[in-house]
Image: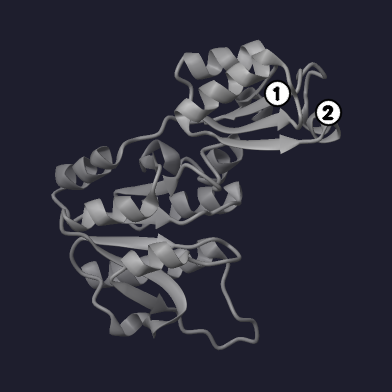
Amino acid sequence: MRYEEFMIEGRNAVIEAFRSGKNVDKLFLLEHSKESAVNTVIREAKKQDTLIQYVKKERLDQMSETGRHQGVIAYIAAYEYATVDEILKNAEKKGEAPFIFLLDDIEDPHNLGAIIRTANLAGAHGVIIPKRRAAGLTATAVKASAGAIHYTPVAKVTNLSKTIEDLKKQGLWFVCADMGGTMMYDLDFTGSIGLVIGNEGRGVSRLVKEKCDFTAAIPMAGDIDSLNASVAAGVLAYEIVRQRR
């Protein structure tokens, strides 16, 4: 699988990608462009709530595989997204209390793929990611998931806080990873649970943290102050697995 298969260049090609319903994860546009076709691209991107980044020509030239980007490069999801309802149905079908990962602005596609892999191995029913400011299902993420993406559905939502509120009404409890939280061994992770993992540098955002029922701290005895996001996800996920068994 070659990564460039998931990159589309040129105004018309990108407009057609949007109009054909493809999941465009990120859009890179030449800054200060006044072309009317670029305005059409922007209009289509806003309908899909696609993340737009305005960059210099040098950056686009560097990214381009064809040398004919016309000031427009889009990254298409390498895999189809599921819905939150499909994730819940996945749990129902297995006769299990829902166990869902929610990722608050994970930016590195390698981390995203690794977390999807962990979610699959821990028996989670799906992964939820936000539409904005976060890694999507690029070829890199799909490859890093080591095939787990074929079995673990990933949903993309506009507002993570609102999604947590909606899932709480369906009986889920939410725990987020935070160094200032309660030691994870002292918390009850049985039942329907959502595990929230924060951004690699900033952690879980304040708005999302406020919606969580618990904050869980991972015991650490080393000289550095935090774990990689995908490792933290694995540690907490397996404490949830232990308790659910």
Element at label 1: strand
In the displayed structure, would residue 126 be above or below residue 214?
A: above
Disc 2 target residue: 61
Q: Nearer the viewer, residue 238 or 135?
A: 135
Q: Residue at x 77, y 32 (%)?
A: 63
Residue 165 occupies quadrant? bottom left
Q: Position of residue 227 (x, y in %)?
A: 56, 72
Color theme of the render = one colour
3D distance between C-alphas at marks 2 and 1 = 10 Å
Q: Residues within 10 Å of mark 2 (few under 14, many from 20)?
A: some
In the displayed structure, would residue 50 be above or below residue 216?
A: above
In the shown orientation, is residue 181 left or right of residue 76? left
The reply to whether residue 121 is visible in this rendering is no
| Amino acid type of the residue tagged 1 in the rendering | Val
Q: Nearer the viewer, residue 32 or 128?
A: 32
Q: Position of residue 108 (x, y in %)?
A: 61, 51
| Label placed on residue 72 | 1
Q: Residue at x 54, y 61 (%)?
A: 199
Q: Residue at x 52, y 50 (%)?
A: 112
| Amino acid type of the residue tagged 2 in the rendering | Asp
* Mark before the other along the chain sequence, 2 or 1: 2
